[in-house]
Image: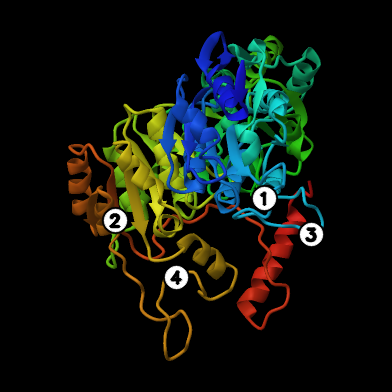
Amino acid sequence: MKLTMSQALVKFLDNQYVSFDGVETKFVDGIFGIFGHGCVVGLGQALEQGGHNLKFYQGHNEQGMAQAATAFAKQNHRRKIIACTSSIGPGALNMVTAAGTASANRIPLLLLPGDTFACRQPDPVLQQIEQPASYSTTANDAFRAVCKYWDRIVRPEQLMTACLNAMRVLTDQAETGAVCLAMPQDVEGESFDYPDYFLQKRVWYMDRRIPTQREISLAADAIMNSKKPILIVGGGVTYSDSQDAAVAFAEKFNIPITETQAGKGSIPWDLPLNLGGIGVTGGPAANNVAKQTDLVISVGSRLTDFTTASKWGFRNPECKMIGINVSSFDAFKMDAVSVVADAKLSLEALLEELDKRGYKSGWGCEELASIKSDYSDEIDRLYGIELENGLSQTRALGEINKFIAEDAIAVGSAGSLPGCMQRLWKCSTPGTYNMEYGFSCMGYEICGALGVKIAKPDKEVYTMCGDGSFLMLHSELYTAVQENLKINVMLFDNIGWGCIENLQNNQGTDTFGTRFCARNPETDMLDGELLNIDFAKIAEGYGCKGYRVTNVDELKAALEDSLKQTKPCLFDIKVAHKSMSDGYDAWWRVGVASVSESERVQAAYEDMQAHIKEARLY
């Protein structure tokens, strides 16, 4: 079939399917796009021409639409995607951040940026960056560092191998992430006689990787030698639909469950063995058992510094590790006994093996129940805090958590809110917690809510967003209005980057550059009056319903009224300064100054050195 490269690309994407546990799903739902000269007459023409079933979504910032596409794929457990196209230069480079978000979180994201002319005849074209050292280098080379697969299609027939390799990576449960296919704008319009077998329906099988008997035996040996193991539930548990297997395993052997940000929400909060978030943004219960454990069974986790408390959180010197992960890169972390396999199959095989050997953990039922009860009391305390100087962040979060439906989906990403949510948010229904914390990318919140709502249009979606993140990126709020998709933006306004201010202060440095203050003419510093912004009015200008909230009663009334709305809602929640939750005995290593005139900074440096001596080195 004689087609332009862009027309063939559209037909190819429209015919890609995935199969997981025998369920076949159309993989590419549609394409987000912001058209410019680098793609509008190429891929834009192919989409406009029709003859396909790809839905076109109009983005309003290239990073924003790609973040929305990432959230869409995450909410669909990586079995559906929305591709993203942009023009060359700044449009393409705007998507680099989103590519980092997707790759860090192991989420499939297909990026199709326009590129400079392959023929080079009109060079330098508008928005082209010329590199004297290599004429073949373009802005799109910036994607190489943040993508799992990168290609540039300089001849129309190269599309075939590029697309097949792109799909290979996008559907690989171990190696998925961002994929960039750079498309020179002249090649987009060039034609080729594409064979039928390239354009026909193709199914990519996301088979469960089976653990070997050797892996199961070694892991079982390690568990048999442990008295107080703990289970870390990571994102891999969610993506492999292995929640039931994790619960069955934990209950069979009385092993406490702890959660990462990506794993939270897969195990119901009311399960007695679920002790909640672990690590730097974790709670007292999980961090308590982490200090005692002699064996960490990590399932589907990347074991980031937040989860391990910079490799300091497991205080028992005899503590060993088991890593269950489809990615060998993650399974071997922290010198673990590795099981490179599917989470569900691995847990089921381990349960059978340990049952044969008659294993039971040494955790006391009353001991774990007491730890969970104390934690529940702490959550209730934080949810009920009353402050004289305003509404506390934890109180506001608690009211939202209590009010929304059990199947409503909570979204978040950066700042202090992810810490409060991992510690305090109660999820009773799987699939209702979409937290991007692999990259902690400010601006994901509203874009992510849009992607989640596209994935689950019948669910209420609530995104927890700081004022700093809103100012960083809220372009896709307009897209939500355009698509008539109701999202609820819970904007917590503490007039600054409160999370980083806390970090700054806790390491001995006075507040500097982290509050949103006007320039002071007397000091010529940013220490003047605080900048109070009416975010509700901004939202109303977009066509949303805006609420200004300063106390609990106003919040409750706004939540009730929002259920009557059919358009996006923004809650401008004015929260008191430094009213977020604190950490619970977890250390996070940051680069504290080794030399300072401040005694507090010197003390922070000495404290860091002491913790480094106690932490594992790898």
Please, is residue 100 above or below residue 83 in the view?
below
Q: Is residue 253 left or right of residue 497?
A: right
Q: Position of residue 585 (x, y in %)?
A: 57, 53
Q: CA distance from mark 1 to mark 4?
A: 48 Å
Mark 3 packing: few (<14 Cα in 10 Å), some, or many (20+)?
few
Amino acid type, residue under disc 3 in the picture: Pro
Residue 345, by quadrant, is: top right
Mark nearest the camera among 4 and 3 is 3
Residue 572: give its label: 2
Q: Tag 3 or tag 2, which sits nearer the N-term?
A: 3
Q: Tag 4 or tag 1, which sits nearer the N-term?
A: 1
Amino acid type, residue under disc 2 in the picture: Asp
Q: Position of residue 89 (x, y in %)?
A: 60, 52
Mark nearest the camera among 1 and 4 is 1
Q: Tag 2 or tag 1, which sits nearer the N-term?
A: 1
Q: CA distance from mark 1 to mark 2?
A: 50 Å
| Residue that label 4 marks | 515
Q: Is residue 378 visible?
A: no
Amino acid type, residue under disc 1 in the picture: Pro
| Residue that label 3 marks | 132
Q: Tag 3 or tag 1, which sits nearer the N-term?
A: 1
Q: Is residue 543 left or right of residue 235?
A: left
Mark 1 packing: few (<14 Cα in 10 Å), some, or many (20+)?
few
Residue 159, by quadrant, is: top right
Amino acid type, residue under disc 4 in the picture: Arg
Q: How many marks?
A: 4
Residue 122: give its label: 1
Quadrant where the N terminus sits is top right
Q: Considering depth in this image, is 344 or 462 the residue closer to the camera?
A: 462
Which residue does the image show at 67% across and 50% down from the upper left? 122
Q: Position of residue 136 (x, y in %)?
A: 77, 48
Residue 506, by quadrant, is: bottom right
